[in-house]
Image: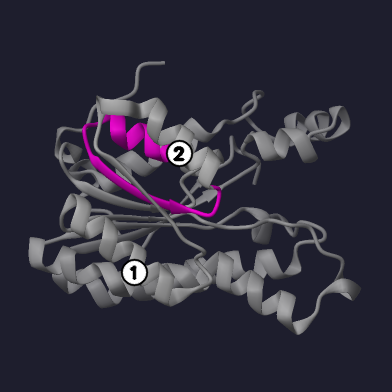
């Protein structure tokens, strides 16, 4: 499939959290292919460095190691990307962790950590970056949620709670930042076949159940989410804000 080209993305500076693997890796690659200047963070240094090397000179890509639960480190990484690439006008809050957890095993510390990984950093990244967008006359923030909170997925109470919170955050930021022509939207992925999902959870039985529930009878891949991300970042979606978009093949 040939991807759509968005001339408005060329030379734009994009900041992506969790960009070394899975959906995030695909987002990094897709923005690079559009001619954007891409900064991304992760804790998986080997995967991140391999991604940067693979993209090579085809695009400007800058990586910073960062644990998003450390807000001071997050702000420092944003500053380093800004210094390397210029003012940031596109933010993709993608970093997350979907570790399964039984109710009886959840501690207050685990709960707080899941909130920090899955939603808290999204606010503070937006807080640190939106002045760039305001100065530029506009920008786009894309927050990643999950369909887990809509389907009532088992063993994911903390994850589902945090990912539901992403929708509230998106609505509030859209209202607060719209006056500066900053658009804020959310993407709600369904079961996307990242390497992690394939290695850990996609059994023949699970796949059969998925195909029964989805309207589209094929597996979804990270590129399906990356393409929606490109659209919401581009000027082609200039009239869209405060919305959430489900990318799940019609599972819900």
Furthest-right residue in this view: 104
Residue 73 on image: x %, y %: 42, 70
User: What secondary structure is found at the residue carrying circle 1?
Assistant: helix
Q: Badge 2 is on which residue?
A: 49
Q: Badge 1 is on which residue?
A: 76
Q: Is residue 67 above or below residue 215?
A: below
Find the distance from the CA under tag 1 to the CA under tag 2. Answer: 19 Å
Quarter of the figure with residue 114: bottom right
Q: Residue at x 72, y 81 (%)?
A: 109
Residue 166 in sight in this render: yes
Residue 185 on image: x %, y %: 37, 58
Q: Residue at x 69, y 40 (%)?
A: 196
Give 236 or 22, whichever is nearer the viewer.
22
Q: Residues within 10 Å of mark 1 (few under 14, many from 20)?
A: some
Q: Residue at x 21, y 32 (%)?
A: 35
Give 155 or 59, whichever is nearer the viewer.
59
Q: Which residues are the magenta region? A: 26-44
Q: Residue at x 47, y 41 (%)?
A: 48
- Report whether 139 appears left or right of 111: left
5 is within the stretch colored magenta: no
């Amino acid at each position: 499939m040939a991807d759509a080209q968005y001339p408005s993305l060329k030379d734009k500076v994009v900041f992506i959290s969790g960009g070394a693997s899975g959906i995030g890796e695909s987002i990094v690659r897709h923005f690079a292919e559009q001619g954007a200047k891409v900064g991304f963070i992760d804790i998986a240094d080997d995967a991140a460095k391999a991604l940067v090397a693979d993209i090579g000179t085809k695009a400007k890509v800058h990586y910073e190691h960062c644990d998003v639960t450390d807000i001071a480190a997050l702000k420092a990484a944003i500053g380093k990307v800004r210094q390397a690439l210029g003012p940031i006008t596109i933010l993709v809050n993608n970093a997350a962790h979907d570790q399964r957890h039984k109710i009886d095993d959840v501690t207050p510390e685990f709960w707080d950590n899941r909130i920090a990984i899955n939603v808290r950093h999204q606010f503070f990244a937006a807080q640190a970056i939106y002045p760039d967008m305001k100065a530029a006359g506009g920008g786009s923030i894309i927050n990643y949620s999950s369909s887990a909170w809509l389907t009532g997925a088992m063993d994911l109470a903390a994850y589902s709670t945090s990912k539901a919170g992403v929708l509230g955050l998106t609505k509030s930021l859209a209202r607060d930042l719209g006056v500066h022509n900053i658009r804020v939207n959310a993407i709600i992925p369904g079961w996307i076949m990242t390497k992690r999902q394939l290695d850990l959870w996609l059994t023949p039985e699970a796949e059969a159940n998925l195909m029964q529930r989805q309207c589209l009878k094929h597996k979804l891949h990270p590129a399906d989410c990356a393409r929606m991300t490109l659209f919401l970042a581009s000027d082609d979606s200039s009239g869209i804000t405060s919305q959430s978009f489900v990318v799940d093949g019609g599972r819900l």
